[in-house]
Image (cartoon, rainbow, N blue to C red):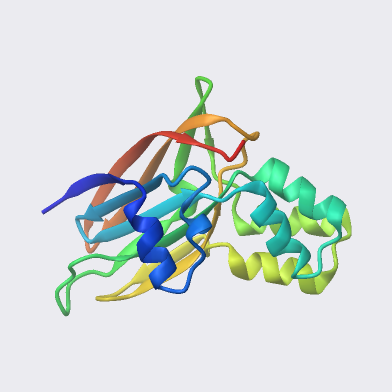
């Protein structure tokens, strides 16, 4: 069964029980969830102060951490397979195909390769830049039955921007696309 879902404060309790701070459920508790056609995607905006704290703890200077939080529109996310039978799949996501619609314009996500170039341009500490790269989802990933990954997605929009998010994936030879509407970057 395929279904989009909008989960509220109940996920905050689950996150707390799983050892994740409840505040990471999203700045306003809004979590977007899709489960169907082989894919499970859960995502929620991270407050900018949490993004800054995360980056400072990994060795970024305060100016660079602040710029990433300001420019990034960072969401914590879990992506993986959903209800795949053994031998079915794999589920393949290519973040370069994922789109954002904001203010009447379509754009892509800011991928780890783009962030790596930006960190080199800024002269960021190499160890900090690697920590950011590893925190961001790979640009392409395959998932077998029960596979998943947790990480960050960067929508590269200004704080408080409302947007629609179109995501796509392949399962075996089939292609799928769905969207979340009225998402919002942390103000």
In x, y percent, where is residue 110? 60, 48
**Quarter of the image that includes the C terminus:** top right
Picture layout, residue 137 above or below residue 43: below
Picture quadrant of residue 58 = bottom right
Give the side of residue 120 with respect to residue 90, left or right.
right
Q: Residue at image x 40%, y 57%? A: 12
In x, y percent, where is residue 118? 77, 52
Q: Residue at image x 46%, y 67%? A: 150
Which residue occupies the extreme top position in the image? 104
Residue toward you, 9 or 65: 9
**Quarter of the image that includes the N terminus:** bottom left
In x, y percent, where is residue 102? 51, 27
Picture layout, residue 179 above or below residue 173: above
Which residue occupies the extreme bottom position in the image? 86
Picture layout, residue 1 above or below residue 138: above
In x, y percent, where is residue 90? 27, 70
Q: Residue at image x 78%, y 63%? A: 56
Q: How many marks?
A: 0
Give the side of residue 167 with respect to residue 27, left or right.
left
Give the side of residue 3 with respect to residue 168, left or right.
left
Residue toward you, 10 or 144: 10
Give the side of residue 7 with respect to residue 185, left or right.
left
Q: Residue at image x 16%, y 79%? A: 86
């Amino acid at each position: 069964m395929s279904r989009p879902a909008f989960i509220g404060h109940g996920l905050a309790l689950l996150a707390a029980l799983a050892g994740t701070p409840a505040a990471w459920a999203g700045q306003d508790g809004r979590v977007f969830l899709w489960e169907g056609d082989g894919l499970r995607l859960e995502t929620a905006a991270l407050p900018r102060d949490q993004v800054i704290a995360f980056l400072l703890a990994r060795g970024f200077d305060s100016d660079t951490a602040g710029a990433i939080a300001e420019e990034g529109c960072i969401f914590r996310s879990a992506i993986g397979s959903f209800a795949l039978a053994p031998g079915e799949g794999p589920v393949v996501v290519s973040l370069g195909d994922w789109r954002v619609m904001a203010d009447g314009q379509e754009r892509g996500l800011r991928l780890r390769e783009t962030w790596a170039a930006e960190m080199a341009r800024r002269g960021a500490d190499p160890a900090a830049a690697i920590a950011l790269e590893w925190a961001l989802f790979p640009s392409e990933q395959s998932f077998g039955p029960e596979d998943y990954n947790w990480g960050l997605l960067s929508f590269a929009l200004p704080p408080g921007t409302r947007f629609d998010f179109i995501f796509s994936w392949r399962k075996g030879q089939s292609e799928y696309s769905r969207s979340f509407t009225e998402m919002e970057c942390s103000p």
